[in-house]
Image (spheres, helix red, strand yellow):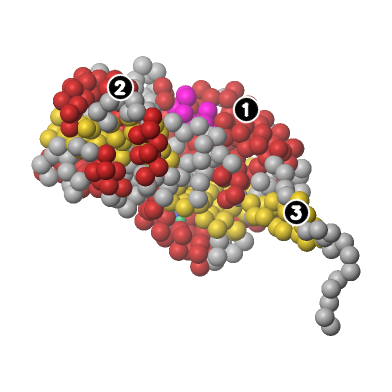
Amino acid sequence: MRAQPEASHYIHGAYANEAEGPEFNSVYPATGEVIARVRSARGDTVNAAVASAREGFQEWSATPAVERGRVLRRAAEILRDRNRELSELETLDTGKALQETLVSDPASAAECLEYFGSLIPTLTSEHIDLGGPFAYTRREPLGVCVGIGAWNYPIQIAGWKAAPALACGNAMVFKPSEVTPLSTLKLAEILIEAGLPKGVFNVVQGDGETGRLLVSHPEVAKVSLTGSVPTGEKVAALAGAGLKQTTLELGGKSPLIVFEDADLDEAVSGAMLANFYSTGQICSNGTRVFVHRSIRPQFIEKLVERTRKIVIGDPMDEASQMGPLVSKAQYDKVLNYMRLGQAEGAELVYGGEAAVVEGFADGWWVQPTIFADVADHMHIAREEIFGPVMCVLDFDSEDEVIARANATQFGLAAGLFTRDIARAHRVVAQLHAGTCWINTYNLTPVEMPFGGMKKSGIGRENGKAAIEHYSQVKGIYVETGKIDCPY
Ligand code: NDP
């Protein structure tokens, strides 16, 4: 097995095995080869991880912010030094093209650690003058936080959760997705190497049951999940029963609007980035591409011409632009939507079936796919596919497209292309989405808050906004005179 870790879990600064949890495989999606085997954590391991985090929290929460920041920035440097090795591991675990993981995965976790490591020592509290007496505030950590990740950006998701949590002085127990268990263990190793006290960042592997044990653990103060809406609903209900705080980064069916005055080549680039990067497995993807009816023929022509040139192939070859889907389950789901789109009457203008890649017969490859003439009521226009399937919908007016863009239970992201600045800001203000782009798509710099409205989530990751979700404010009243007491 090419990527077998020393043991399944990483607890209190060391690898830890567990005998009783069910075993599962990590598979290289390009070939179907088993690359590692790990075990799900059950009660004893979950308890050990949380107890260790509780211990780590005592020391870490008393560490000055400037020192906490230094440790996180050191970890960012180590991640950057090992970028290639970590990106190769991420490509093995996810199947995503190395061309992408080299720039988007460990690198994004590193940026997040650097950002929060730099931000945290600069934050100051309030002094409130009460005309004699005064009050001040302290921003305090929450305690032990649980992070639960999805499989599409494993080390990035772990970094996006660990960095603000740890910067604020919390400890974290992180559970990666069963589908992609490997890279988060490396992040834990690196944080220890950077000087993080033992127990402050622990990793336990496991399935939904492990997640449930973590969320319901009485010593856990907060849960941050990246996953699907149904899992988010379950996690929120369980966390709510224990009155725990939650951050939920869930799914989407985001609109991308191309107005008639858009730079067409740029808009095509945006639509491709919004649908084909990461083989379409991105929560914020702009999968409903609304194109003004007057420019639709030119748009489709350019789009198809460029989609035809996408290089699908060996993910480890840096020339490859698209790898396979992450799992057989995802492959079946995406192919099913490709068939459904045709059955529902959408016009298939490109792709629509499995892709054949020489030398990788057992991988989960699909073609980048474009449907036109998609109607709002179709399943492919309403449900999250999480694969490289773009739906092109026509529109005639600004008001109409805003209403149709918003007519969804999701509200994660949205984008628009136009040369008219006034229209750009007018429209973006009316879109029900937590993250919006004007004249680009899917850029998520760590300085900018990211997260969803409606069923796409609660809370924000990244930016200063994340600090609010990993800390609590204490108000302290200081009397400087005599107490005015009626008794
Ligand atoms: P899932 O919701 O299936 O799983 C997410 C995580 O939750 C996994 O680690 C999973 O464990 C765990 N889990 C499952 N059931 C429970 C439970 N009852 N209690 C606690 N934890 C549980 O999502 P996927 O992994 O399939 O990821 C794809 C989804 O994630 C898509 O819908 C996508 O939109 C969303 N996503 C959202 C992002 C965002 O930032 N908004 C970013 C990336 C993805 P396991 O898998 O090991 O069983």
Q: Report x, y in % for residue 354.
A: 20, 32
Disc ID at residue 128: 3
- Marked residue nearer the N-terminal end (2 or 1): 1
Disc ID at residue 386: none
Residue 321 vertical position relative to residue 113 in the rendered view, above or below: above
Q: Quadrant of the N terminus?
A: top left
Q: Report x, y in % for residue 268.
A: 28, 25
In front of the other: 211 or 238: 238
Q: Amino acid at mark 1?
A: Ile
Task: Work out how far the residue at label 3 is from the one at label 1, CA to CA, in angstroms.
Answer: 41 Å
Q: Amino acid at mark 2?
A: Asp
Disc ID at residue 263: 2
Disc ID at residue 78: 1
Task: Work out how far the residue at label 3 is from the one at label 2, CA to CA, in angstroms.
Answer: 51 Å
| Mark 3 Cα shell of 10 Å, populated few (<14), some (14-19), many (≥20) | some
Q: What residue span does the magenta drawing correspond to?
A: 101-109
Query: Dots 2 and 1: beta carbons under 8 Å?
Result: no
Residue at image position (51%, 40%) is 449
Asked which secondary structure carries label 1, the reply is: helix
Task: Work out how far the residue at label 2 is from the one at label 1, CA to CA, in angstroms.
Answer: 40 Å
Number of the front mark, 3 or 1: 3
In front of the other: 392 or 332: 392
Residue at image position (15%, 29%) is 349
> Does the stretch in magenta take in 60?
no
Splitting the image into 4 quarters, where does residue 483 fall? bottom right
> Does the stretch in magenta take in 102?
yes
- Marked residue nearer the N-terminal end (3 or 2): 3
